[in-house]
């Protein structure tokens, strides 16, 4: 399996520009997670989806952030407009369906975002 | 609120010098406790899941244990390639959200 695929791997943009990060989860996984990692705050969950439906978006910092999952094999995280404080590494992760069992999440390589 | 605290923040070991990393947690009903390894510039890599107090899991030089309040990651006779950041996370009984600790940065010198 190719694992979780993220693109782009690096993004440098100017303040005020729109940024779109992309993720393809592992085939057969129906839970998808977006995380942000910074030195100050560590790894934080932004939003997660089960069966393409957003379940918990309480970690989304503000209305400038939005996420979609139009189908089981693709998700986007959009920041509009971007600000320097959004600079971080953004990870996408996926896991098998969870019912009563607990399944590990598999992470992608991340997108390093720099907003100047 | 679910919380995870890892200690120490950083640990330097000589090759072959065994030690342990600690993960203390508070969670409203534990569904699972996870250990991940993260190398610089990469995403976290899954190591272990522990479900109940008393459980232990091993993988090469690593052994993870779990009590009702904390987990330990024991590293036996480490090698330089074990150098990485080790992350601990908990999942509560409801939902699939993971709450991560800040991690322990491990450096093993030859």
Image (cartoon, rainbow, N blue to C red):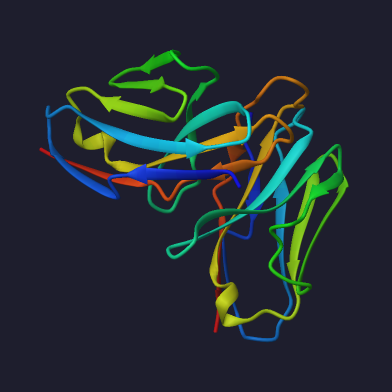
Residue A115's image quarter? bottom right
**Is residue A106 depicted above or below A40 in this figure?**
above
- Please indicate whether residue A90 sits to the left or right of residue B56 in the image: right
Quarter of the image for the C terminus of chain A: give it.
bottom right
Q: Position of residue A87 (x, y in %)?
A: 55, 72
Residue situated in front as seen by the camera: A21 or A54: A54
Q: Where is residue A39 shown, x and y percent of the image?
A: 43, 63
* Depth check, front residue: B17 or B97: B97
Q: Is residue B62 above or below residue A19?
A: above
Residue drawn at (86%, 43%) of the image: A52
Task: Write the residue at 26% across / 35% down.
Answer: B81
**Side (left or right) of A9 relative to B97:** left
Q: Is B60 left or right of A78, judged from the image as shown?
A: left
Left or right, B20 with reference to A31? left
The quadrant holding residue A29 is top right
Please name the residue shown 64% across and 40% down the image: A4
Residue at image location 63% in from the left, 60% down from the top: A8
- Tell me where residue B90 appears, x and y as whole percent: 55, 35
Give the percent coordinates (x, y) of residue A74.
80, 47
Quadrant (top left, top right, bottom left, bottom right) of the N terminus of chain A: top right
């Amino acid at each position: 399996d190719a694992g979780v695929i993220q693109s782009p791997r690096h993004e440098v943009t100017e303040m005020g520009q729109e940024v779109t990060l992309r993720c393809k989860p592992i085939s057969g996984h129906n839970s998808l997670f977006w995380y942000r990692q910074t030195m100050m705050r560590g790894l934080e969950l932004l939003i997660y989806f089960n069966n393409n439906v957003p379940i918990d978006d309480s970690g989304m910092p503000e209305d400038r952030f939005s996420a979609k999952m139009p189908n089981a094999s693709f998700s986007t995280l959009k920041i509009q407009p971007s600000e320097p404080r959004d600079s971080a590494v953004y990870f996408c992760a996926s896991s098998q369906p969870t019912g009563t069992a607990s399944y590990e999440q598999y992470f992608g390589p991340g997108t390093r975002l720099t907003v100047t | 609120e679910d919380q995870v605290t890892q200690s120490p923040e950083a640990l330097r070991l000589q090759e072959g010098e065994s030690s342990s990393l600690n993960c203390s947690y508070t969670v409203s009903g534990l569904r699972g406790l996870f250990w991940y390894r993260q190398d610089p510039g990469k995403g976290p890599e899954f190591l272990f899941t522990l479900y109940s107090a008393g459980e232990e899991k091993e993988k090469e030089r690593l052994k993870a244990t779990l009590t009702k309040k904390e987990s330990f990651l024991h590293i036996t006779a480490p090698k330089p390639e074990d150098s990485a950041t080790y992350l601990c996370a908990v999942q509560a009984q409801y939902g699939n959200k993971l709450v991560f600790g800040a991690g322990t940065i491990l450096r093993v010198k030859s």
